[in-house]
Image: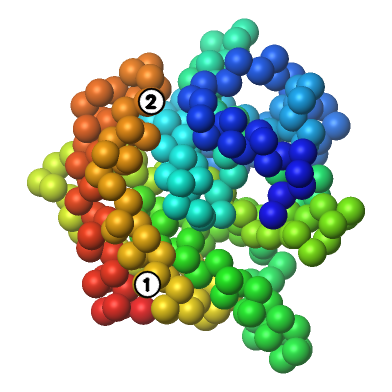
Amino acid sequence: MPPASVLPLREQWRREVCSNHPWKRDGTATLAPGEAGGFRVCCDGVPFGAYLKPTRRDSATARAANEKIVADLAADLGFDVPSVLLYRRPECPPEEETHCCVSLIQYPEQYEWRPIWNLAAMDQFIKSIVTALLARYSGNVALDLWIGQTDRNNERNAIFGIDPQNKADGQFMFLDHSYSLNKENRWRANDSWRTIEMVPLPAAFRESLVKNTVVEACDRIAAFTDDAVVAIVNRIPEEFMSQAERQTVITALTGRKGQLREFIERNL
């Protein structure tokens, strides 16, 4: 569980859609941006700041809107995803993206999961600890499957957050859902959303999965009402995602959620 100072922000960011915070670039942070571009930002009242993204324009994918939709779905369903708000970037350089989002940083310390990928190189005792820890997050694969995540096999797309004052509450958080849902309009033609494919995963995570936990998460998603999906997606302003694309995403999410359990039963 994140530090107590962050919990009210998580609830607030779920209720809200767009950020009006006076964000400033965090000049003390040294974090290399991902493929979509971005940087850490800070402001009063947000203890550990946030990560602003994307900065690179992408006319084919509503990256910021995808992040917000997935974060809200995850919040309601109990998955391990940081809170997100949409953000209209003021005084934006003309060559960069104006319609961004901010992803809440929930821990004072966070570490990318790449160092634990190579299970074969580990002592058996350490390997057992790592796989037992990763197994607790098996359910997140169901969320990735639902949204059509294609970028989980990425050394930077999951982090372990920890509070030095309360080490027992450290946890993994799963990041970067911008390149999911209807990315590049992939779900628009011929009901292509009906095709479900296994999420690409690093071997260490795949080997740690507990099938029953993934199945239970699939059932949780299947029970999530169509109305709840519609409410989350239709909150996105037109400038971040068009009405036509919102409808595509709604059709896909409501249609896919009942297919997940059968897919996992056959393929995991």
Quadrant of res 63: top left
Give the x, y percent position of residue 188: 18, 39
Residues tagged 2 and 1 counted as in contact (Cβ below 8 A) = no
Give the x, y percent position of residue 92: 59, 12
Closer to the camera in the image, 218 or 63? 218
State whether residue 186 appears in this view.
no
In this rendering, position of residue 30 left or right of residue 186: right
Give the x, y percent position of residue 81: 55, 49
- Work out whether 21 lies above or below 213: above
**Residue found at the far bottom of this picture:** 124
In this rendering, position of residue 199 left or right of residue 54: left
Task: Give the mark nearest the N terminus, 2 or 1.
Answer: 1
Q: Which residue is mark 2?
A: 236
Instruction: Give the position of the C terminus as an image quadrant.
Output: bottom left
In this rendering, position of residue 151 left or right of residue 166: left
**Residue found at the far left of this picture:** 190
Element on which disc 2 rests? loop
